[in-house]
Image (tube, rainbow, N blue to C red):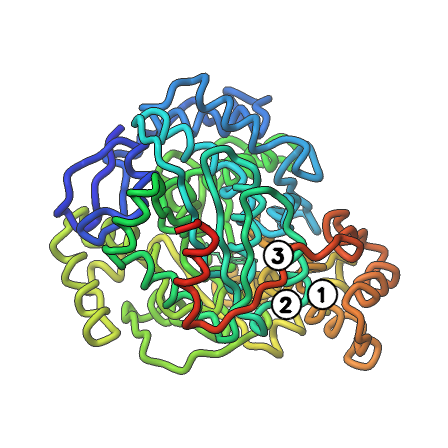
Amino acid sequence: MRYISTRGQSRPVTAAEALLTGLAPDGGLYLPEEFPESAALNPFTAPSLTYRQLAGRILTMFLSDYTRAELEECISQAYGSNFATPAITPVTMVDEKLGFLELWHGPTCAFKDLALQLLPHLLTAAARKMQFDREIVLLVATSGDTGKAALEGFKDVPGTRVIVFYPEDGVSTVQKRQMITQEGTNTYVVGVTGNFDQAQAGVKALFTNEAFQRELAAAGKTFSSANSINWGRLVPQLVYYFKAWFDLCQNHGLAPGETFNVVVPTGNFGNILAAYYGKKLGLPLHKLICASNRNNVLTEFIQTGVYNRNRQFYQTLSPSMDILVSSNLERLLYDLVGADPAPVRAYMDQLQRQGSYQLTAAQKERLQKEFWAGFADEAETTAAIKSVYERYQYLLDPHTAVGYKVYRDYLEATGDDRPTIIASTASPFKFNQGVAQAVLGPEAAAVADEFALMEKLSAVTGVAMPAVLAGLRDKPVRHQQVIAPAAMEETVRTILGL
Ligand SMILES: *Cc1c(COP(=O)(O)O)cnc(C)c1O
């Protein structure tokens, strides 16, 4: 299968090349030329597939230039004892019609592990196939979850190095602790005395610095990005939506021909796009429900057809969704405009120039046929955590709580009470503060030590902490460096010995 650019001005490439380059040269995102509906992905004809087997079937369809053996090797390295449960992504039903698809049993306790435990292996296999013998240097600016997931994914993977910049005061206590205690001989973690945008700008400046690229190439190295626009991050995310369907059929009575809804807490539009692509492959989804926090640019887009990033940016309890430009949306746009790169280019150009664009009535109709959208503000997020805990004794992290609030809105607005799966994107203990405030109340949550608070939350609720988070307290700090934003290039030079 070949990959084409959403902007139509780059030549089609193989999967290996799409993964290695990330972004197409014309600035567009790579898309598979087709989405073959597959009988191999059906719980009624192939009922006993494990997570790994499902991953094998899906990856084989999309990464057709990889051999079966290559894919199996990658998959077995990605989804094993590094996950806390053999189910990898279990579904917990809290009542007959509502389940949470738990995507946080991996090493960093957020859903990005499902893609980033696999991507390093896919990338190094792609490099081997293309006889590309430079060292791959992953350069990441993170607001929290991506950086840690990339570090864990690339840790000690031969032929790679990973350098992560995080805003010193802009990540949660647990996230920071996760990063500064990172193990591995090829991992580098650097705090920046600035905000996420400054760290991101520094990384972008390095990516676009041609003189630096030449120097890097001369030293036998190349930069790569683990950004969520890489097709190699998207395709692994299809697997768990199929796994959820299998689970609903086998354990919760979903019959052949019956459909279900998914609710996805959304930021960069990667996770929900994977569900949409699943539907193209035959996943029986009714509505894709897009849940945003106070940065509700996608809610407005889906409700009105107007994408407008000219608005106030808010820092929220669900920081991984604090995004105003959802880069993966470009792939959906390509479908909405009728698989035509010219209008995609025009919309992206308008977004760049004036910060907004508007769909035609027909395009909006197509969008609304598949998607429904809503959002939760801060108080509603906290209330959702509290209400789900009281009702079901089940703990939600703030991102997932946004999803639950929007699910309730959807039920009320439409009366559609068919089975629904909410993507649970992080462990509640990773966003301990917000969850403890909601469940224990502000007074009881006023515990200065983050780990003591985690224990308290666990003791009061009877919900076990993930072992990888509990173990963080005693891990030695391995990365102490903190720099000014202006020193990022110099720091990368030092790390790479340039
Ligand atoms: C990244 C992230 C999201 C948003 O996912 P997108 O694919 O960017 O829409 C939601 N929740 C958590 C916990 C995340 O880390």
- Mark 3 or 1: the one toward you: 3
- Mark 3 or 2: the one toward you: 3
Identified by mark 2, the residue type is: Ser
Q: Are marks 3 and 1 in contact (CB under 8 Å)?
A: no
The spot of residue 40 in percent (x, y) is 44, 22
From the image, tell me which residue sits under label 1: 432
Q: Residue at x 36, y 81 (%)?
A: 311
Q: Residue at x 37, y 62 (%)?
A: 326
The spot of residue 76 in percent (x, y) is 56, 26
Identified by mark 1, the residue type is: Asn
Does any atom of ligand 1 lie closer than 8 Å to the CB of label 3?
Answer: no
Helix, strand or loop status at disc 3: helix
Q: Earlier in the sequence, mark 1 or mark 2?
A: 2
Residue 179: which numbered mark, if any?
3
Q: Are marks 1 and 2 in contact (CB under 8 Å)?
A: yes
Residue 172: which numbered mark, if any?
2
